[in-house]
Amino acid sequence: MDRWKGRVALVTGASVGIGATIAKELVRYGMTVVGCARSLDKIQALAAECKSAGHSGVLIPMKCDLTNAEDIQSMFAAIKAQHKGVDVCINNAGLAHPESLLSGKSSAWKNMLDVNVMALSICTREAYQSMKERNIDDGHIINLNSICGHIVINSGDIHFYTATKYAVSALTEGLRQELREAKTHIRATSISPGLVETEFAYRLHSEIPDKATATYSHLKPLEAIDIANAVVYVLSAPPHVQIAEMLLRPVEQQA
């Protein structure tokens, strides 16, 4: 990770869970990390925690509504003005609503598309343009995908969410191909975790808390630090090695 010291990483959805842990780890390795979310309180607290821990990098909280394309572009403009641009883009933000294909709400479907697909695509485009205009040839774009980007689990609550994650799989591979055709050494990676113990299931099943608790009761799930370690591993690969896809499962997970 030495070559990344002092360089700029954007982590979306950095206020809680996997995003917060990734941001903290990259700061520990000496990177300048822009952590974005709709609310800054938790990222500001995390930034203070990183500073008091004496980490060699710095965490910079930045407010952004990822459902708003103009907000995303304003964020990238601010990063350019303050830090020249991004060298690493980690598209971590994602959400799920328990809305089936047969009776789901259109507004919930759109919200999932806006965050899981459109925001990821816009951030990817803006990150690449930032790298290109500064002749950055060793940047990295990492998409936080899901096991649901590879298999369809028999649960109506997450079928539309699963479709958005299949899109992430296709978008990441398409990105890899376009980067190769552009003759750049910027790399693209999809990281697909299985069950991770975060607030995700509790948000998904907010109206049925017992269902969220039961999700984690039958096996030892992955932890946010496991995903952060995967990000560090991917970034640490030699420049000629592209880890296009990394899939992580708890040992006991069936699907």
Image (cartoon, rainbow, N blue to C red):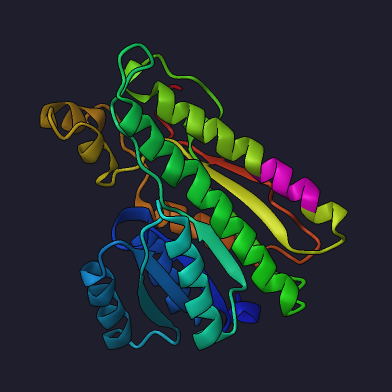
Q: Residue at x 73, y 76 (%)?
A: 133
Left or right side of 96 for 48: left
Q: Is residue 77 left or right of residue 23?
A: right
Residue drawn at (56%, 55%) of the image = 122
Q: Is residue 174 magenta?
A: yes
Of residues 128 and 235, the one drawn nearer to the viewer in this rendering:
128
Q: Looking at this rendering, what residue extends furthest in the top direction?
A: 102
**Residue 47: where, in percent of width, then height?**
30, 78
Residue 136 visible? no
Q: Which residues are magenta?
A: 172-178
Residue 102 spot, x, y in % from top left = 35, 11
Is most of the magenta stretch helix, strand or loop? helix
What residue sits 52% from the left and 71% below the top? 76
Which quadrant would the N terminus be assigned to in this image?
bottom right
Query: Compared with residue 230, is residue 171 higher up or lower down, i.e. above or below?
Result: above
Q: Residue furthest front?
A: 70
Asked whether 169 or 214 is in front, the reply is: 169
x and y, in percent, of residue 110 in the image? 40, 35
Query: Where residue 217 sits: x, y (%)?
Result: 21, 30
190 to the left or right of 53: right
**Where, by quadrant of the figure, is residue 233 drawn?**
bottom right
